[in-house]
Image: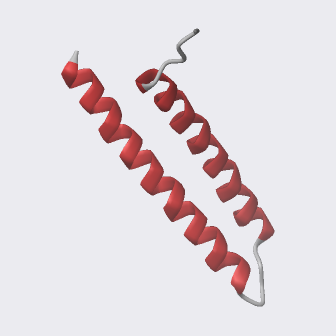
Amino acid sequence: MMDDIDALKRKLIELRKQHRDLDDSIKDLTQGAFVDQLQVQRLKRRKLELKDRISALEDQLLPDIIA
């Protein structure tokens, strides 16, 4: 049980890092004179996918408690 929780926490940390890295990449791409909109769109889509996965993992780690 504890190993599963630790694995989920490690995965969550990894996904959050990837999300931040994508955010930095998007900022870098949009700073230049020429902006590759297709590449930016792909990175944003990937970032949203990561956000969904992060939310799902957070839900597994902290399930809603109905009062």
Which color scheme does this rendered protein use?
secondary structure
Percent from the top left, x then y, of residue 67? 58, 9
**In percent of the image, x 62 and y 51: which residue is there?**
47
Answer with left or right where residue 21 lies relative to residue 38: left
**In percent of the image, x 72 and y 78: which residue is there?**
30
Answer with left or right where residue 31 lies relative to residue 6: right
Q: Nearer the viewer, residue 67 or 27?
A: 67
Residue lying at the far top of the rendered structure: 67
**In percent of the image, x 33 and y 36: which residue is there?**
9
Residue lying at the far front of the rendered structure: 67
Above or below, 2 against 42 in this view is above
Query: In the rendered image, which quarter is residue 40 located in?
Result: bottom right
Percent from the top left, x then y, of residue 2? 20, 21
Q: Quadrant of the N terminus?
A: top left
Q: Nearer the viewer, residue 1 or 14?
A: 1
Percent from the top left, x then y, of residue 14? 38, 48
Residue lying at the far bottom of the rendered structure: 33
Percent from the top left, x then y, of residue 24? 56, 70
Above or below, 18 against 27 in this view is above
Q: Nearer the viewer, residue 64 or 19?
A: 64
Q: How many marks?
A: 0
**In percent of the image, x 56 and y 34: which residue is there?**
55
